[in-house]
Image: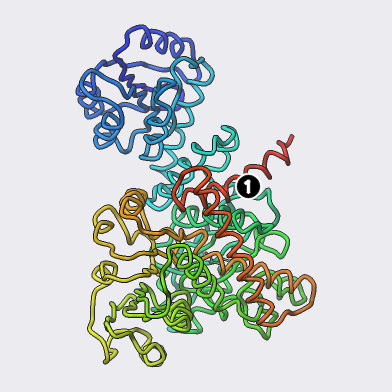
Amino acid sequence: MGDDRLTVLLVEDNPVQARLIEGLLKRSTTPAFEVVHVDTLARGIQRIEEGGVDVVLLDLILPDSEELETFSRFYAHASETPIVILSGLDDLKLAGRAVEGGAQDYLVKDRIDGPGLIRSLRYATARARARSAEWHSPMFRLAQQQFLKAAHLMEMDDNIRQRLLFPERTLLVSFPFRRDDRDQVETVFGYRVQHVLAMGPTKGGIRYHSSVNLGEVSALAMWMSWKCGLMHLPFGGAKGGVRVDPTGLSRSELQRLTRRYTGEILPMIGPDRDIPAPDMGTDEQVMAWLMDTYSQQKGYAVPTVVTGKPVVLGGSEGRKEATGRGLVYLVEEAARRTELELEGATAVIQGFGNVGAHAARFLADDGVKVVAVSDVSGGLFNENGLDLEAVEAHVRENRVVEGFGDADSVTNEELLELPCDILAPCALQNQITAENASKVRCRILAEGANGPTTLEADDILASRGVFMLPDILANAGGVTASYFEWVQGTQNYMWTLKEINERLRRAVTAAFHRVTARAERDDVDMRTAALIEGAARVSQAKLSRGLFP
Ligand code: GLU
């Protein structure tokens, strides 16, 4: 059905209310609404299954179902159709919970007016369409739903909420690079997404992975906005990526790919515009090639166009380890709060890349026994603690942890269920879900990866008393040290490792206290508190800049 005509399924048992809504919708012509009215949940579900409904208006109190139950039963049959909740003034908390659970919005019955109603239905439909078209991605859905939850709880300005739900700028390119076998040219997809341009230059890493797509990059860009907001950094969020498996590429192929990708995104980046950094599948070397390609175009060296570059090119001391180091500073704070003695405590780490391997090492420095680590090849478990130096040496030689002698092997799934004090998922997204969250047996969950836990899993973990260090806080040490690197670059003045680490500790500790204070004040979980802290700053900045023209 086109944009000019929307079919609304109105599930409402109060005939007066239903007539009122139908009356308001009838008056609209752009879009025109066709209203299908039913008065029980069972009939609503039956109608949605017949298809052709664009958007649903759902009353939560119906003759055959009440409260959140109504929403979850309906949602189970209509997760792809946008749902707007009709709520009584007394049931606002309930409506909020439904928004957390996947509803697009809610309207307060006594306050419904024509323009507000039409706007809400239009936005809900447009959002759902964008989600099923170019932003079709579970990860982007997770990022949006997390944000909607926080926006609802903090009563964010409605106009700002709509602006922040999608990135402001996206670039999607397809481009070729030559394989080592010179006759072979590969064409791949590349992305650069800038979520918020109001705060200063945008900032965020570049990911090379076979799962990269527009939705994933957009979700990661959105998280960068909240992360920078939470850390009080003068950046908006961005992210980039190429859909390619870098492990299958030689060094020279990786270099050609990087240079061509840089050429494609060149108009979008720059030291005052948008500053890339490493992320999954990229490293210091990739940043060096990126900086070189950009500098060649300008005719002079521009080190500040990227962060996370080699120290000899103006990279910062301590940047490489900063994500892992920041995570461990935060675990120290969390341990103090939960009265966990770190000396002799146990840790399980998923992922042995730049974040996981450094986190493991710094935890071990604190006297923590790292009993398990993993990578794409699987996991290692030794209840007496792994010899991390030996594991690192093994990985240097064999690229993967597989085949390391002094440990039992476990799968990545089994690893997440090992009993431990600290669990740090430092690999991929979507690892702790409704299926396995009840089997996670840790006291502190420190999310080194972006988006490793789903919303349903969050609830389960919270009910089991797990102390959560959410991704936008737990892995914020990386972008914080990136900020230090950028400041040093723009001032042409270098700080020592000691200075970097002290500043890093101060920055993440202050953010930790902001988040715990917010969690207590608003009676929300740590993730929501972190999101609110980050999003509030972005929202304030946008409001103070006002609207052009
Ligand atoms: N890719 C990292 C992140 O997700 C670092 C970004 C940066 O340093 O700009 O936070």
| Above-or-below relation of 386 to 138 | below
Q: What percent of the width, then of the height, locates residue 386?
A: 33, 86
Q: Residue at x 30, y 51 (%)?
A: 460
Give the quadrant of the C terminus. Answer: top right
Residue 183 in view (yes/no): no
Q: Quadrant of residue 184?
A: bottom left
Q: Which kind of residue does numbered mark 1 sit on?
A: Val
Give how far across and how far down residue 444 sits, in percent: 39, 64
SS for dot 1: helix
Seen in the image, is 266 located left or right of residue 474? right
Residue under label 1 = 538
In the rendered image, the vertical position of residue 177 relative to residue 405, given as above or below: above
One can see residue 140 in this view: yes
Q: From this view, report whether residue 329 is shown above or below residue 64.
A: below
Camera-side residue of 436 and 18: 436
What residue is shown at x 36% (from left), y 40% (from top)?
101
Question: The N terminus appears in which quarter of the rendering?
Answer: top left
Q: Position of residue 4 (x, y in %)?
A: 46, 23
Seen in the image, is 359 located left or right of residue 205? left
Q: Residues within 10 Å of mark 1 (few under 14, many from 20)?
A: many
Tell me how many marks there are: 1
- Quadrant hosting residue 542: top right
Q: Position of residue 525 (x, y in %)?
A: 44, 49
The quarter of the rendering in which ligand 1 is drawn is bottom right
